[in-house]
Amino acid sequence: MMRTIVTGLHQQGYNEFAAALEKLKLDSVFNSGMQYTVFALTDEAFRQSAGNFSDYDLRFFVLNHILGGKSYSSSFNNKTYRALAGNVFYITNDSISNFYNEWVKFTNKDIEIPNAVVFELAKNINIYPNLFHVLPSYYPFFYSFYKDSIVPNTVQYPQILGITSSGL
């Protein structure tokens, strides 16, 4: 069996997160050879946070727990990063916060799986709607307008969001 991000998540016990990627048909996208950083919720935390989401909301929830590029805890050094679905997070070597100063500690970190590094969260990072979620048809304009000012590890993969030049 080919080792993939999804099989790696399953093998590490993040079954709900992996199942969401499969349900959304993102498993093949994340196995394209690119590198990622995944903030995976424990199965219990995932069920409590995203158990009743529509596929549309689940996609943004999951993608706001993934960064483009492989990052380890030693590289975070109190910087801001933009998740694949657009939300910005402040990350230290042991925790992550949204911009409402709601902090979540990593319960496990630097877990190697194929094409990714995983950080475990026993509690959800509160995800608030952003422009990509509320107005997806504006994504092409927004990205082209702001692409030079967006921080590293940002929304570089519109196909992951399911967004084309005409929106979702």
Image: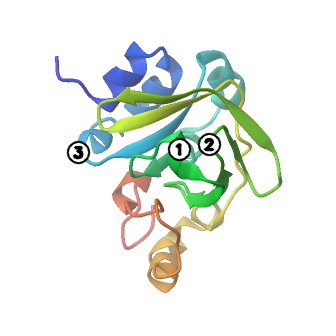
- Determine whether 61 is above or below 136 in the image: above
Location of residue 14 in the rendering, given as x and y in whole percent from the top left corner: 50, 20
Location of residue 150 in the rendering, given as x and y in whole percent from the top left corner: 52, 73
Residue mark closest to the camera, 3 vs 2: 2
**Quadrant of res 51:** top right
* Left or right of 120 in this view: 103: right
Question: Mark 1 to mark 2: distance in Å?
Answer: 6 Å
The first of marks 1 and 2 along the sequence is 1
Tag count: 3
* Left or right of 6 in this view: 33: left
The first of marks 3 and 1 along the sequence is 3
Visible in this render: residue 89? yes
The first of marks 3 and 2 along the sequence is 3
Of residue 167 and residue 100, the one placed in the foreground of this image is 100
Q: Residue at x 60, y 20 (%)?
A: 42
Residue mark closest to the camera, 3 vs 1: 1
Instruction: Determine whether label 1 and label 2 are within 8 Å by CB.
Output: yes
The N terminus, quarter of image: top left
Question: Mark 3 to mark 2: distance in Å?
Answer: 27 Å
Mark 3 — residue? 32
- Determine whether 19 is above or below 103 in the image: above
Local crowd size for mark 1, using a 10 Å CA cut-off: few (<14), some (14–19), many (≥20): few
Mark 1 — residue? 74
* Left or right of 123 in this view: 132: left
Q: In terms of secondary structure, where does tag 3 sit?
A: loop
Local crowd size for mark 3, using a 10 Å CA cut-off: few (<14), some (14–19), many (≥20): few
- Determine whether 158 is above or below 97 in the image: below
Mark 2 — residue? 93
Local crowd size for mark 2, using a 10 Å CA cut-off: few (<14), some (14–19), many (≥20): some
Q: Residue furthest left?
A: 1
Location of residue 165 in the rendering, given as x and y in whole percent from the top left corner: 37, 73
Q: In terms of secondary structure, where does tag 2 sit?
A: loop
